[in-house]
Image (spheres, rainbow, N blue to C red):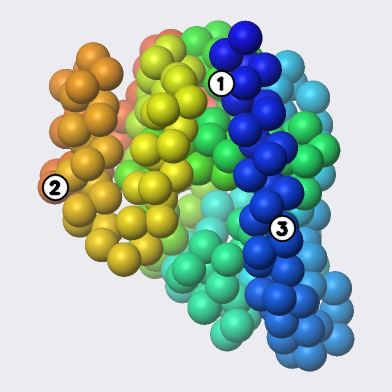
């Protein structure tokens, strides 16, 4: 019943937003096309519920063929990002076309962010739990790590640093969301996602309060406040011995 109600909510809101945002969508399509005469959309292969792949649609914020570099994680200093793309990313407008993914049933408004197959291949048995629900446009981690590009800025190996610094906490936050999810929680997270654009500090404080209220591990609450520097951490369900098979520790 809970999943059915969530699906009805997703469909209804996605249709309303597509109508309301149609002028903005058309303007962005034209603006992105004019900068290099290529498609304004980027369709990236992601892994969804049950491990099924799907094409996640975004407004293109990078140069054509950027995905052929083999680097999956993107820092703020990434030269593949276009000038218009930086503006689009700043206000999360690149995510708007994912409303079509919601209509198609690939995604929900709220849920763990979908990942590429190469990253999902690294998931521990515990992290496989992230694939039991539809991925979302936003969740706890989307707010806590909205500055992912800044965290990875200047990194010589963004993919490695993502897996050391960000993935462990993203996975934990996603698993916590799955454990406590409800339509009310989804509405709160959607509102906080919008608030984060205006006041990141306030949004982080409220996310930390939500996590505390829903019984999250104190370490998750601490990370959500983002007052401490991030340090290399093992993802949930991973031991150092098994992790070293994928990454080289310094």
Q: Callout 2: 10 Å neighbours few (<14), some, many (20+)? A: few
Give the Cα distance between marks 1 and 2: 26 Å
Of callouts 3 and 2, the N-terminal one:
3
| In the rendered image, the vertical position of residue 54 relative to residue 157, given as above or below | above
Residue 1: tell me if it is visible: yes
Q: Callout 3: 10 Å neighbours few (<14), some, many (20+)? A: some
Q: Which mark is residue 18?
A: 3
Q: Which residue is mark 1?
A: 130
Q: Image point 24% across, 47% down: which residue?
A: 204
- Pointer 3 and pointer 2: residues touching (CB < 8 Å)? no
- Pointer 1 and pointer 3: residues touching (CB < 8 Å)? no
Q: Secondary structure at mark 2?
A: loop
Q: Nearer the viewer, residue 246 or 14?
A: 14
Q: Image point 63% across, 44% down: which residue?
A: 13
- Left/right placement of residue 5 relative to residue 156 reads right
Q: Which mark is residue 227?
A: 2
Q: Secondary structure at mark 1?
A: helix
Of callouts 1 and 2, the N-terminal one:
1
Question: Where, quadrant-wise, is the C terminus in this rendering?
Answer: top left
Q: Image point 26% across, 62% down: which residue?
A: 199
Residue 230, percent across and down? 24, 43
Task: Identify the image quadrant of residue 80.
Answer: bottom right
Q: Secondary structure at mark 3?
A: helix
Task: Identify the image quadrant of residue 39.
Answer: bottom right
Give the Cα distance between marks 3 and 2: 37 Å
């Amino acid at each position: 019943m809970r999943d059915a109600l969530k699906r009805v909510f997703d469909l209804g809101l996605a249709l309303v937003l597509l109508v309301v945002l149609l002028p903005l969508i058309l303007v962005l399509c034209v603006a992105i096309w004019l900068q290099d005469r290529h498609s304004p959309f980027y369709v990236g292969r992601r892994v969804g519920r049950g491990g099924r792949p799907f094409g996640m649609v975004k407004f293109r914020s990078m140069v054509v063929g950027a995905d052929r570099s083999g680097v999956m994680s993107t820092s703020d200093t990434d030269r593949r990002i276009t000038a218009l793309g930086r503006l689009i990313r700043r206000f999360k407008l690149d995510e708007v076309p994912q409303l079509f993914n919601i209509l198609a049933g690939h995604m929900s408004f709220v849920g763990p962010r979908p990942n590429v197959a190469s990253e999902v291949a690294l998931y521990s048995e515990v992290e496989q739990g992230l694939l039991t629900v539809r991925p979302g446009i936003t969740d706890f981690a989307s707010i806590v790590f909205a500055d992912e590009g800044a965290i990875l800025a200047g990194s010589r190996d963004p993919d490695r640093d993502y897996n050391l610094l960000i993935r462990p906490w993203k996975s934990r936050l996603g698993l916590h969301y799955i454990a406590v999810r409800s339509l009310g929680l989804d509405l709160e997270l959607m509102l906080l996602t919008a608030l984060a654009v205006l006041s990141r500090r306030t949004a982080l404080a409220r996310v930390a309060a939500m996590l505390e209220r829903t019984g999250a591990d104190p370490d998750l609450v601490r990370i959500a406040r983002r007052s401490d520097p991030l340090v290399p951490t093992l993802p949930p369900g991973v031991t150092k011995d098994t992790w070293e098979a994928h990454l080289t520790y310094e």
